[in-house]
Image (tube, rainbow, N blue to C red):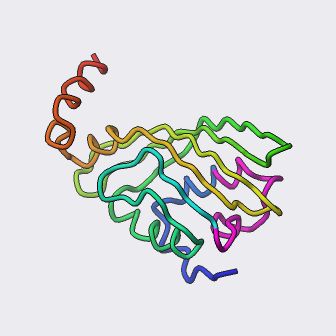
Amino acid sequence: MTAIDDLDDFAGLDPFFRIIEEGINGFAGGDHFFDLLADDVVFDYVITVPGYPRHVVGRSAAAELYQPYGDTIVLDRCFDLAIHHDRKSGVVVLEYASEGRAVATGAAYANRYISVLTIVDRKVTRWRDYLDQIVVFDALGWDPDALLPGLGSAHEADRL
């Protein structure tokens, strides 16, 4: 198994790590989030933001992707965990929420996620992730109308 050198590099994601560990406790084994992943784990970010990869292969590649996360968004907590497990297929679906702040803007960040994990031999071998990308745009100060013409104003109307 590939070693992750310094877990302090991932402090901005600590609440995320804890809720995932809680969600797959008993299904996958390891002391920390990265220990739960197979060396050749495949991540697919089905709904994501521009500039973020849609497909990542390998535990080390995932660590490299997550390492600078705390420079952009720091999570204060993750909560509202719902766990759905299909014993036959080894698939675990986790629904959860997060709250934190965007580092550059100081804006509040709150999102909801669905993570679909395939577990084989007590390791996560596949991860499909879904989130609300407009929430990311709002927290980072991006202009959704510039990125997705017409959708930014529609999103604002949903909040009223």
Q: Is residue 23 above or below residue 74?
A: above
> Which residue range is magenta in the image?
20-40
Q: Which quarter shows the N terminus?
A: bottom right
**Relative side of 74 to 32, left or right:** left
Q: Nearer the viewer, residue 22 or 37?
A: 37
Residue 152 inside the magenta-drawn segment: no
What's the residue at 79%, 49% (across, down)?
Answer: 90
Q: How many labels sit on residues?
A: 0
Taking the view exactly as shown, the residue that stands out farthest to the top is 160
Q: Based on the displayed image, in which of its 4 quarters is residue 7 positioned?
A: bottom right
Quadrant location of the C terminus? top left
Is 21 inside the magenta-drawn segment? yes
Residue at (17% x, 28% y) in the render? 150
Rendering coords of residue 87 (x, y %) = 85, 43
> Based on the displayed image, in which of its 4 quarters is residue 116 positioned?
top right
Q: Position of residue 31 (x, y in %)?
A: 73, 68
Front residue of 84/9: it is 84
Residue 6 place in picture, x, y as percent: 54, 80
Residue at x-position 48% and y-position 52%:
45
| Residue 109 drawn at (x, y percent) | 36, 43
Q: Residue at x 55, y 45 (%)?
A: 78
Q: Residue furthest left?
A: 146
Q: Which of the pair 19/122 is nearer the observer?
A: 122
